[in-house]
Amino acid sequence: MSIKNLVRKNILRLTPYSSARSEFKGSAHVFLDANENPFDTGYNRYPAPLQWKVKDKIAKLKGIAREKIFLGNGSDEVIDLLLRIFCEPKEDHILILPPTYGMYRVSADIADVEVREVQLGARFQPEVEAILQAANAHSKLLFLCSPNNPTGNSFSPEAIGRLAAGFPGVTVVDEAYIDFSAQPSSLTLLDQYPRLVVMQTFSKAWGLAGIRLGMAFASEEVIELFNKVKPPYNVNQLTQEAVLKALDDYQQQQQWVQSILGQRTLLAQYLSGLDFVERIHPSDANFLLVKVAEPRRIYDFLVERGIIVRDRSRVSLCEGCLRITVGTPEENEQLFRALVEF
Ligand SMILES: *Cc1c(COP(=O)(O)O)cnc(C)c1O
C-alpha cells in the first residue's frame, strides 16, 4: 500500500496556508511582510515555521536526515495530525493494543474515528497474528507504544518488525520512554519501512515536559504531509530556544537517565521487601507498574501524605496495579518511608 492511497482525499487536494516567512527565500533585513510589531521585544517576530536550527541538532544527535523530522506541540499534536491526515471520520479506524497510553483513543474520539482494540498478550507483548488478522483497508494507523505506558515493558523487536512489515496502514511506534530502555530504537527501521512513523518527545528524559515538544521521524513523503497540515507556527520561539539550549548539553540528559535508572533498581528492591507488594512488572521506562493487595487504600494513604502515584487498578490487565514514577533519591525515600508506615 503506497502512502498516497492511505491519505484522506481532502488532504491530498489541500493547498496549505502559506505564511509570509515560509514564502520568502533569501536574506533580508527589513521585514514588512507579516504585520508584526517592528519594535524589538525579543519575541516580536513569528518563529521559524520549519524549525531548521532545532532539526539540524536533532538530526546530528539521532543520525537521521533533517528532512525526515517533524516537530510538534508535544507528541499530542503528532498523534492528532496523524489522525487528521490518514483517517476519514466514520469510515476508517485505528488499532491500539490496551493497556496503553490514553491519548490515542481521546484523539480518535475527537476526530470521530473508530478505535479497535487487540489486547496485549503474555508478558504484555503484542499478539502479532491477531493484530494482522484484525487489520483491513480501513485500518489506517496502528499505535505501538514501546516501552509501553502503563506496563513499562518494551515490545520485542521481532514483533515490531513483523507488524511494520505486515500492517497495511501506517505503523506508529511511540518511543516516549526510549531513553530509559535497554532495547534499541526503531529509528533504524525507517529506511526499510516507508509506512513507519517513530515518535519521541522532550517531555520525559530531557526534562522539558513544560515546553511541549514532540518529534516524529518518518519518510520524507510522510513528513511533507505533516508540514502541509500543521498550523504554520506550531512550535513557538520560547520552545525552540529552550530546546536548542538543552540539545547543547546531552551529557546532562544522560546523567539524569543514569540517575533515574539507578533509582528504578533501588525502588524495585525496596518495594519487593514489602509484604503487600504482589508483583513488580519489569520496566524499561522511568516508572514501575506495581501490583499491590489494596491499591485504593495505598493510593489514598499516600495522597494524605502529599505523595501522588497513578492508580491503574481498574484498567483491564492492570488489576490491582499502581503506576509509580521514579523520582529523585529524596522523593523515592519519602515514598518508601510512607509505604513502610502503611
Ligand atoms: C508521556 C508520553 C508521551 C509524551 O507526550 P507529549 O505530548 O510529548 O508530552 C507520549 N507518549 C506516551 C506513551 C507517553 O507516556
Image (cartoon, rainbow, N blue to C red):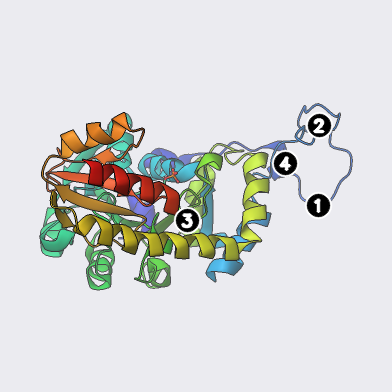
Asked whether, in this view, residue 267 is left or right of residue 27, the answer is: left
Dot 3 corresponds to which residue?
205
* Amino acid type, residue under disc 4 in the picture: Arg
Mark 3 surroundings: few (<14), some (14-19) or many (≥20) residues within 10 A: many
Say whether marks 2 and 3 touch (CB < 8 Å). Answer: no
Q: Do we see residue 178 in this rendering?
A: no
Label 3 to label 1: alpha-carbon separation: 37 Å
Label 4 to label 1: alpha-carbon separation: 11 Å
The quarter of the picture where the C terminus appears is top left
Asked whether, in this view, residue 52 is left or right of residue 230, the answer is: right
* Amino acid type, residue under disc 3 in the picture: Ala
Label 1 to label 2: alpha-carbon separation: 24 Å
Element under disc 2: loop
- Cβ of mark 3 under 8 A from ligand 1: no
- Mark 2 or mark 4: whose residue is earlier in sequence: 4
**x%, y% of residue 248?**
66, 61
- Mark 2 or mark 3: whose residue is earlier in sequence: 2
| Nearer mark to the viewer, of 2 and 3 | 3
* Amino acid type, residue under disc 2 in the picture: Thr
- Mark 3 or mark 1: whose residue is earlier in sequence: 1
* Amino acid type, residue under disc 1 in the picture: Gly
Element under disc 3: loop
Foreground residue, 103 or 192? Answer: 103
Dot 4 corresponds to which residue?
21
Label 2 to label 3: alpha-carbon separation: 32 Å
| Nearer mark to the viewer, of 2 and 4 | 2
Label 3 to label 4: alpha-carbon separation: 32 Å
Dot 2 corresponds to which residue?
41
State the residue at coordinates (23%, 52%): 289
Foreground residue, 336 or 189? Answer: 336
Mark 2 surroundings: few (<14), some (14-19) or many (≥20) residues within 10 A: few
Q: Do we see residue 340 in this rendering?
A: yes
